[in-house]
Amino acid sequence: MATISLRKGNTRLPPEVNRALYVRNLPFNISSEEMYDIFGKYGAIRQIRIGTNKDTRGTAYVVYEDIYDAKTAVDHLSGFNVANRYLIVLYYQPTKMTKKVDQKKKEDELTKLQEKYGVSINKDK
C-alpha cells in the first residue's frame, strides 16, 4: 500500500497537508454511508460532515485519524467521478476559508472608525 511506504521513509509532508479534507462538487443527494464507502477505503475516518444548507450543499468535510491516510485520499480521489460529478478534494485550510470574512470585517471596522473621527478619504486625488 502507498501509505505503508510513506510511513517507512522519513518523508516530510508539505505544510498544507492536513487530516481534515474539504470536498466540493458532491451530488446533493449523497448519503453519509456512501461517503464512508468512498473515503473509508483510504483509512480510518474520525468524522464526516455533509453540507445540508442552501449555501453548503454539495460540500463536505472529511476528517481522518491519520494524516497519511488523508494524503492518500486526496491523491486518489481528486477528480474521482461520483454520479457524473468530478470530486474536488482539498486539504482544509482555515486561514483561506476565513480570509474573505476577515477582509469584509476589517473594511466595515475601518468605515466605522472613519465616520467616528470624521475622516474622509478622497479617491479622486
Image: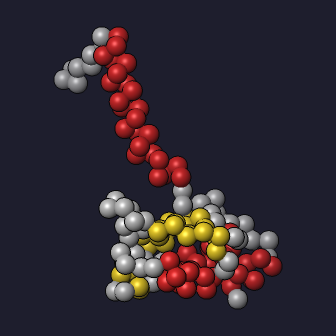
Q: Which residue is depicted at the point 75% across and 83% down?
A: 4
Q: Where is residue 93 in the image (x, y as percent from the top left)?
A: 54, 56
Q: Is residue 17 visible?
A: no
Q: Which of 7 and 19 is in front in this view?
A: 19
Q: Position of residue 69 (x, y in %)?
A: 66, 76
Toward which corner of the image does residue 10 lie, by quadrant?
A: bottom right
Q: Which residue lies furthest to the left in this view?
A: 124
Placement of the C terminus among the 4 image quadrants: top left
Q: Which residue is depicted at the point 64% across and 66% down?
A: 19
How did the renderer colour the structure? secondary structure
Q: Which residue is depicted at the point 47% across and 69% down?
A: 50
Q: Is 74 situated above or below 14?
A: below
Q: Can residue 12 be seen in this view?
A: yes
Q: Position of residue 83 (x, y in %)?
A: 37, 86
In the picture, measured across the screen, residue 82 lies left or right of residue 34, that is: left
Q: Which of 33 and 123 is in front in this view?
A: 33
Q: Which of 27 and 117 is in front in this view?
A: 27
Q: Where is residue 74 in the image (x, y as percent from the top left)?
A: 55, 75
Q: Is 109 situated above or below 101?
A: above
Q: Is 121 situated above or below 54?
A: above
In the picture, measured across the screen, residue 70 lies left or right of residue 60, that is: right
Q: Which residue is depicted at the point 40% across and 46% down?
A: 100
Q: Which residue lies furthest to the bottom in this view?
A: 1
Toward which corner of the image does residue 80 lie, by quadrant?
A: bottom left
In the picture, measured across the screen, residue 37 lies left or right of residue 86, that is: right
Q: Which of 100 and 13 is in front in this view?
A: 100
Q: Is 111 situated above or below 31?
A: above
